[in-house]
Amino acid sequence: MGSWVISVVPRTCKGVIHGVHHLITKKEFEEASAFNQGNVIKIVNAARIESRPGGPYKSTSSVIVTFEAAELPDSVTILNSIQRVTKYIPEPTQCYKCRRPGHIAK
């Protein structure tokens, strides 16, 4: 019998934080504190939501944050400011060619 290597990947969840100042960077988000029932939750990734209302893409004041936890924290403390976290619900995938949902054109 050979030896087995088992790796455990922690669960992640995504949330949205609205009203974030445009000068706050991704690095500052990843260094921020998130707590859920007294436990510290690590922030894995942060990305600004971009919109394109009839022109080039522009960053908004909303940020999608990925947490290394099974449950979303209630809030995040970043630069001494407490920000509320809401559940991230992604836009459904839609093909730009046939307009049917669930796939995109290749």
Image (spheres, rainbow, N blue to C red):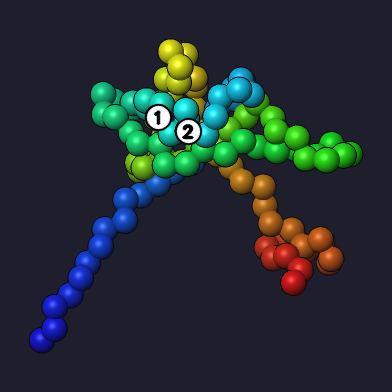
> In the structure shown, which secondary structural element does the residue marked by tag 1 occupy?
loop
- What label does residue 27 carry, if any? 2
Identify residue type, mark 2: Lys
**Of residues 98 and 51, the one drawn nearer to the viewer in this rendering:** 51
Apparent side of residue 4 relative to residue 36 in the rendered image (left or right): left
Q: Position of residue 4 (x, y in %)?
A: 17, 75
Q: Which residue is pictured at 40% across the width and 36% down the height?
A: 43
- What label does residue 31 carry, if any? 1
In the image as oriented, which residue stretches furthest toward the right? Answer: 54
Q: Which residue is pictured at 77% across the width and 62% down the height?
A: 95
Disc 1 to disc 2: CB gap under 8 Å: yes
Q: Which residue is pictured at 28% across the width and 25% down the height?
A: 37
> In the structure shown, which secondary structural element does the residue marked by tag 2 occupy?
helix
- What label does residue 14 carry, if any? none
Alpha carbon separation for disc pair 1 and 2: 6 Å
Q: Position of residue 93 (x, y in %)?
A: 69, 57
Q: Position of residue 54 (x, y in %)?
A: 89, 39
Apparent side of residue 21 relative to residue 99 in the rendered image (left or right): left
Identify residue type, mark 1: Glu
Q: Which residue is pictured at 26% across the width and 29% down the height?
A: 39
Apparent side of residue 1 relative to residue 70 in the rendered image (left or right): left
In the image as oriented, which residue stretches furthest toward the top? Answer: 80
Q: Position of residue 63 (x, y in %)?
A: 58, 33
Give the number of marks.
2
Mark 1: few/some/many CA within 10 Å (<14, 14-19, 20+): some
Residue 87 appears in view: no
Report the quarter where the N terminus lies: bottom left
Report the quarter where the C terminus lies: bottom right
